[in-house]
Image: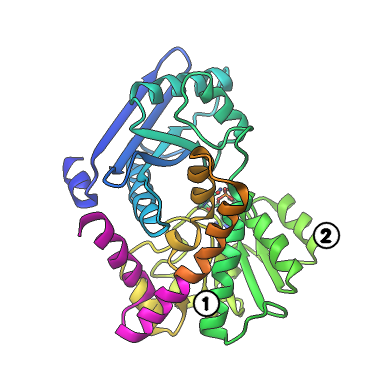
Amino acid sequence: MFAAMRSERMEALHLFSDPATGLEAVVAIHNTKLGPALGGCRYLAYNTLDDALADAMRLARGMSYKAALAGLAQGGGKAVILRHPHVADRAALFEAFGRFIESLRGGYITAMDSGTSSADMDCIAQQTAHVTSTTHAGDPSPHTALGVLAGIRAAARARLATDSLSGVRVTLQGLGNVGYALAELLQAEGAELLVADLDHGKVRLAEQELGAQPLALEAVYETPCDLFAPCGLGGAINQRSIGQLRCAVVAGAANNQLVEAELGEQLMARDILYAPDYVINAGGLLHVALTHAGVSAGDIAGRVKGIGERLDSIFAQSRAEGLSPAEVADRQAEQILYG
Ligand code: NAD
């Protein structure tokens, strides 16, 4: 485990267990050079503890890079609560997690993520002030979707030579909190939507409400479109799926879209423009961090829109230096974190 921590340049890894509530949780703190670590709390089933640790560490690293490129005085961290089939009292589980967060004395601030809700954050808030995206602070997902929309515009300018999304064919993989909000925004812009989700109910809703065309889960890669937006759980671009892609752009909300860093170069070699995940999906982080710091809603909206300009500059540097956008973003973030 220490070797894995070294290779991810991880500062700390905490394991928590509370037999009374059945809580088993991991908090990974990647880097606190710019400020306390902030990052969401996932509540998901994992096959093994090692899988949960690896997920938490990868995501924590992404949060450090995301905060650095979003211009925030914030470090990167992530929490994972292992989801077991039966939970006697969900509120008590999240309150127990809140007590553990409190024991870290502000070194890690938690937030909503896949599998958790504002109501869960409210339970954590009973025990600690180091929590955001409570009911009071609001769900970050719509802000993430707005940031992704700004990033999609930047990618369309760079690769499709258009400022308008009208008629642009977008495949959305995942219609969760962010994916569905993004689908609504894209539909309002006149984009043509193709959608897939493990949950057929969400797909049917998108068909009925947004006129989206449903796709089978595996068909998302090979169905021709202008832009593929991964909004599921990460790992969408791997050695198998990359060869199936029939799109000009990959730009979506999911964290850790590339299973291996080299896939960034492979996308470029295939002339597919990739919007680095932690840059395009920073809207939620901007919302939670700046709301926590008392910044006004108007100013936060301006910072979220700025994601488009950040991507404009990454795409321009990528063209000028012949490096993939993923490599350019990593270099910029590492310069801030370690330079
Ligand atoms: P969510 O759990 O609400 O939604 C995920 C959706 O993807 C679910 O509907 C699920 O059924 C679907 N899905 C999972 N695997 C799929 C697959 N293989 N094919 C099709 N559909 C699949 O999560 P969310 O909050 O919408 O977040 C989505 C992604 O964006 C995650 O990777 C998350 O880490 C990332 N993200 C979210 C935020 C935020 O503000 N919520 C911010 C930044 C990044």
Q: Which residues are magenta?
A: 311-339
Q: Position of residue 306 (x, y in %)?
A: 52, 64
Q: Is residue 44 visible?
A: no
Residue 152 versus residue 107 in the image, above or below? below
Q: Earlier in the sequence, mark 1 or mark 2?
A: 2
Residue 332 versus residue 233 in the image, above or below? below
Which residue type does callout 2 highlight? Answer: Gln
Tag count in the figure? 2
Camera-nearest residue between 266 and 121: 121
- SS at mark 2? helix
Residue at image coords 39%, 52%: 67
Q: Which residue is mark 2?
A: 208
Residue at image coords 42%, 84%: 270
Q: Quadrant of the C terminus?
A: bottom left
Residue 88 forms part of the magenta stretch: no
Q: Which residue is mark 1?
A: 249
Quarter residue 266 falls in: bottom left
Q: Position of residue 36 (x, y in %)?
A: 34, 38
Q: Position of residue 91 (x, y in %)?
A: 57, 20
Residue 136 versus residue 329 in the image, above or below? above
Residue 208 versus residue 118 in the image, above or below? below
Q: Main secondary structure of the magenta part?
A: helix
Please give left or right for residue 49 compared with residue 219 in the image: left
Q: Residue furthest right?
A: 208
Q: Mark 1 Cα within 10 Å, few/some/many (few <14, many 20+)?
A: many
Please give left or right for residue 150 compared with residue 243 in the image: right
- SS at mark 1? strand
Camera-nearest residue between 289 and 49: 289
**Mark number, residue 124:** none
Residue at image coords 33%, 50%: 61
